[in-house]
Amino acid sequence: MNEKIETKISKKFKIVISLCAVAIMIFSFFVGYFTHYLMQGEKINSIIWLIKQIEGNYYFDEGDGKIKTFTTEDYADAIVKNLLDKYSDYYTKDEYIDVISTSKGNSYGIGVSFLKTATDNTIFKVSGNSPAERAGLRDGDKIIAGEVGGVKTQLNNKEEIFEFLGGILEDVSFSLDCLRKGETFSVTLKREAFIESFVFYSDSEKSLRFQAEGNMPLQKVEGSENIPSLSSSTAYIALSSFDGGAVEQIGWAMEYASLRGKSKIILDLRSNGGGYMSVLSGVASYFTYSEQARYPVIAVAVNKSGAVQNFTSSGDNFNRNIEKICVLANENTASASECLIGAMLHYGKAFNENYLVIEKNDQGIAKTYGKGIMQTTYPNVLTGQAVKMTTAFIYQPNGRVSIHGVGFIPLNENAVEKGEGIARAIEILQ
């Protein structure tokens, strides 16, 4: 009898314990849910709610019988494009892999780019060491037709050019009819992988490019694309972007100039839209010098919270034999290029405002772009996606002056017409 009673009590006790455990689990779940809800904040919870409503209820038939749906990438891209500035961007996993690869100089295609605002067929920039450069295309050329497999297509704008090129398989030869200064010529090339170079050197007798086939390391290639009007003491160096191997290539060019006894430099930053601050630090080591610091400050960044970050030169590579440096710029000279100009003006070694030449834009105004803000890219380590956004305001080395929205403006005599920058630089350095 007693054993039966004890058994019943034991069973009831176990049931009560089990129910309590379930209750605790349910309570913990709701507490955790509401804690998580509160910790996320009203903004995030509202966005999650909105996405759920769209996913569950939005109905739109685009006319093909399919209900419109959105991917995670669609939502992320919409937020970035509609809320953030034009310098910010969202990358899918594959897009971010391409961004990283491109930042190292790895490219694919023929190597031509067009201005975002352009509607015609004029090439804005031909990438160094690209199939287009090796075929003889240059900045400012117009692509007017393309032929592949015996079929010729007229190309009237950049959209038609992209469509034509996008339909050509890798390693398939094709030709482009182009226009330069009123004369028509044709080139034959292929879409292929290549390592982009960012520097070109020339003096009165020799030229130097950095080239290689496919993904092979770039090599120094001497040529005869010289600028005869340069004096025997002057070297011309064009830097197209602060990316990839630009630091090493600038080093090669400066060393070549030194070996050839050049004491004056024309640094061409026309249409150089900037790039990475780490590359800027390396390039600046060849063009800035301070007796007070081995690693002088090149730019100062101030973020949303007011925290200050100093970007410095990566070393002291300035050639003490250089007497004068003349810088060429235009309306598309921006960001890291403007940081470099600001640093060179600040330290004043072989360079001052008398040596800054800026070509006028189509409205007759001579000024650089005026981009004094910095972007930072944040990758999602779990998904591989990334977001690039504006994170800081950039100031010149004194930490007080910013050219954002203003740009650099030259002395009146150094505001020249488009295409006349080199001639004015030569005149200044004589």
Image: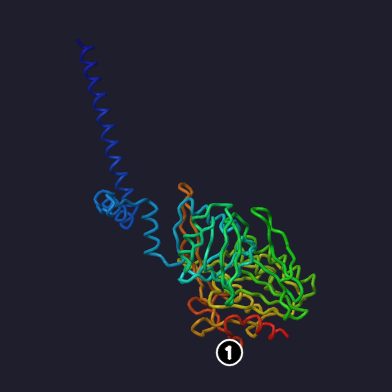
Residue annotated with mark 1: 412
* Circle 1 Cα neighbour tier, 10 Å, few/some/many (<14 / 14–19 / ≥20): few
Judge by depth and name the residue closer to the eye, 4 or 250: 250
Residue 30 drawn above or below residue 92: above
Residue 158: horizontal and vertical position, in percent?
A: 48, 66
Observer able to see residue 103:
yes
Judge by depth and name the residue closer to the eye, 64 or 385: 64
Element marked by disc 1: helix
Q: Quadrant of the C terminus?
A: bottom right
Dividing the picture into quarters, in which one does residue 232 lie?
bottom right
Dividing the picture into quarters, in which one does residue 126 lie?
bottom right
Observer able to see residue 402:
no
Residue 378: horizontal and vertical position, in percent?
A: 48, 56
Residue sitting at 24 percent across and 16 percent down?
7
Residue 106 drawn above or below residue 29: below
Residue sitting at 53 percent across and 66 percent down?
113
- The coloring applied to the image is rainbow
Judge by depth and name the residue closer to the eye, 37 or 129: 129
Residue 111: horizontal and vertical position, in percent?
A: 57, 62
Please, what is the three-letter code of the amino acid marked with disc 1? Asn
Q: Which residue sits furthest front?
A: 150
Judge by depth and name the residue closer to the eye, 221 or 39: 221
